[in-house]
Amino acid sequence: MSERSAVSRRPRGEPRRLLLDAARELFARQDYRGTTTREIAQAAGVTEHLLFRHFGSKAALFREALVLPFTGFVEEFGRTWQSVVPEETKEEELTEHFVGQLYDVFVQHQGLFLTLMAAEALSEEEKTEAGIAEIGQALSLLGQISAEGMNLRGLRSNHPDLPAHSTVAMIAGMAALRSTIFGPKPPPRAVIVDELIQAILHGFLHRQG
């Protein structure tokens, strides 16, 4: 049976899912520039032609596999924030929602963190095509939420967006480096997430006005 016949008999949507899974795995090991479309197609068990038919380019595949999960989470959290009634919302619950879901995004899409670390080596065209610029827009939204949160608590800062950016960096670092930090047996997810929550709440709630 030819590869063409085997591919054509896969369930609808299966090649796309295989390509996304393979891309996430390879980008996590080799970052954006170090990964080729041929390698992704081979890892997915499909033809390179099929990759281009589904996604058009490596950049578009990277954006869908790694960037959209992050920006989608930020957009969802932005909607959650807009619906918050301060008097009826527990800070701990909102923080748990944010930290837990963002930690999972970075664990499941480690290639995003790896590529962001090397983003300075990418051209502006590459950053735009791969959606890296959208990461900056999402971080700006989190910065606005941070500033609004500080204002609600009567806190002042020359850099009101910095708490949000520091929080994202801390969560991303823990997700990316947990094996290096803890070895082959890291603490359970719930323990790591709770530690991050406590660190974030302690730093925020004890900030001087």
Image: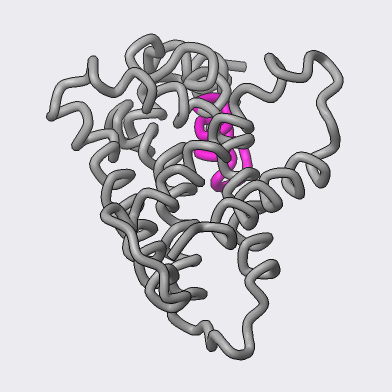
Q: Residue placed at 40% from the left, 46% from the top?
A: 165
Position in image of residue 190 (x %, y %): 81, 46
Quadrant including the N terminus: top right
Q: Quadrant of residue 118?
A: top left
Is residue 15 among the parts visible in the rendering? no
Q: Is residue 177 visible?
A: yes
- The stretch in magenta equals 8-23
Q: Residue 66 in the image: x percent, y percent? A: 45, 37
Q: Is residue 205 magenta?
A: no
Q: Is residue 171 above or below residue 120?
A: below
Specify the quadrant that holds the C terminus. bottom left
The one of 47 and 149 positioned closer to us in this rendering: 149
Residue 76, above or below 179: below
Image coords of residue 187 (percent x, y): 84, 31
Q: How many marks?
A: 0
In the image, is residue 67 above or below residue 78? above
The colour scheme of the drawn protein is: one colour
